[in-house]
Image (cartoon, helix red, strand yellow):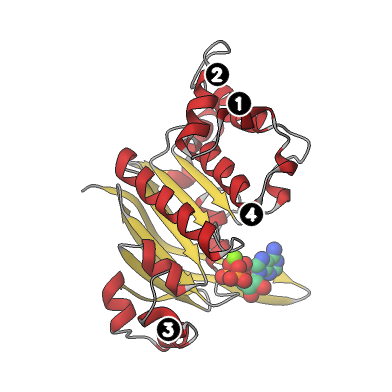
């Protein structure tokens, strides 16, 4: 395997109302192509801040990010636009993630057009193929996004994310709002897509049971720092940090039930 993402010494403080919060405090991590790193931590530990910094939605105070062999923080303009095709995101299901009036087809058409994946004539077929790949009928193309269920919307979000043929998906609480059955199906879809396309995932959740189900390695965040990192099975069965032990204690079903 080859290294896809390497984050070193990333720090970010928020300054609000005279107070300073160290949301990221010297965070380092690495991700191989085709691998899933689960990032777990209590609410407020800095997970979403890290995802926003990686996606270049938020500027860190310091630190370096190498992605796909490039100095990711140094990219701007057309280079950054091109780079974004390779790192895509799926956030928690909220209607706010989409223009509610938009049709499913237009949601999927945008990345194909913007990144020049397919020309105007080819795009309807590409959209139908994307829908089929995420398990939705192609007739969904004409539906307004707001008429879909939460699970269907997350399938559209995944289709949008893979449209540009990325090598990394950052998934921030992507299945957290879904009920258990739907959540399991979406996780299966993600595993299939990873196998087919060699996708890497940074899979963020506060729920260690979900993290364990999908991750090869797990990193545990606490108060802006990564306090533990290791093979998924090791972190769950032999946690080294107090933060990991607290997360395990919060999931009584973890040791007994499949997700
Ligand atoms: N825009 C902001 N301005 C000020 N403080 C912020 C901002 N966004 C986040 N924070 C603070 O930074 C810390 C980390 O927040 P973050 O959203 O990254 O945590 P999280 O691990 O994603 O939590 P959750 O599991 O609840 O989503 C928290 O203390 C939060 O209150
Ligand atoms: Mg968050």
- Helix or strand or loop: what does disc 1 sit on? helix
Indicate if the residue with disc 2 has its beta carbon within 8 Å of ligand 2. Answer: no
- Dot 3 corresponds to which residue? 248
Q: Earlier in the sequence, mark 3 or mark 2?
A: 2
Horizontal and vertical percent position of residue 209: 43, 73
Ligand 1 within 8 Å of disc 3? The answer is: no
* Sequence-wise first label, 2 or 1: 1
Residue 90 against residue 183 in the figure, above or below: above
- Point 61% across, 28% down: residue: 139
The reply to whether dot 3 and dot 2 touch (C-beta < 8 Å) is no
CA separation in Å, label 4 and label 2: 25 Å
**Which comes before the other along the chain, label 4 or label 3?**
4
Tell me which label, 4 or 2, sits earlier in the chain. 4
Find numbered disc 3 in the image and state the secondary structure of the residue it sits on: helix
Q: Is residue 203 above or below residue 208?
A: above
- The CA distance from mark 3 to mark 2 is 45 Å
Element class at badge 2: helix
Q: Can you see residue 231?
A: no
Residue with the mark numbered 4: 93
In percent of width and height, residue 66 lies at 38, 48
**CA–CA distance in space, label 3 to label 1:** 41 Å
The Cα atoms of the two marked residues, 4 and 1, are separated by 20 Å
- Of 53 and 236, the residue lying toward us: 236
Q: Which mark is residue 109?
A: 1
Q: How much space separates mark 2 and mark 1, taking CA atoms?
A: 7 Å
Q: Is residue 41 visible?
A: yes
First in sequence: mark 4 or mark 1? 4
Counting from the top left corner in percent of width and height, residue 87 is at 46, 42
Q: Nearer the viewer, residue 71 or 258?
A: 258
Marks 2 and 1: CB-CB under 8 Å?
yes
- Please name the residue that numbered disc 2 is placed on: 123
């Amino acid at each position: 395997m080859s290294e896809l993402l390497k984050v070193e010494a990333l720090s970010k403080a928020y300054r609000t109302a005279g107070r300073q919060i160290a949301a990221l405090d010297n965070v380092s991590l690495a991700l191989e192509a085709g691998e899933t790193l689960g990032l777990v931590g209590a609410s407020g530990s800095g997970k979403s801040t890290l995802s926003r910094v990686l996606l270049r939605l938020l500027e860190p105070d310091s630190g370096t990010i190498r992605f796909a062999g490039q100095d990711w923080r140094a990219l701007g303009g057309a280079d950054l636009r091109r780079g974004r095709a390779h790192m895509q995101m799926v956030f928690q299901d909220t209607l706010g993630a989409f223009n509610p009036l938009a049709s499913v087809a237009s949601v999927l058409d945008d990345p194909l057009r913007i990144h020049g994946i397919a020309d105007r004539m080819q795009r309807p077929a590409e959209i139908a193929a994307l829908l089929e790949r995420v398990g939705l009928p192609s007739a969904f193309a004409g539906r307004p996004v707001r008429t879909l269920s939460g699970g269907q919307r997350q399938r559209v979000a995944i289709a949008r994310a893979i449209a540009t043929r990325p090598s990394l998906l950052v998934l921030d609480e992507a299945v957290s709002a879904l009920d258990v059955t739907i959540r399991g199906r979406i996780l299966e879809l993600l595993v299939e897509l990873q196998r087919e396309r060699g996708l890497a995932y940074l899979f963020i959740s506060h729920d260690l049971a979900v993290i364990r189900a999908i991750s090869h390695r797990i990193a545990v965040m606490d108060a802006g720092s990564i306090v533990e990192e290791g093979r998924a099975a090791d972190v769950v069965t032999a946690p080294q940090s107090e933060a990991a032990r607290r997360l395990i204690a919060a999931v009584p079903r973890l040791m007994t039930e499949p997700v």
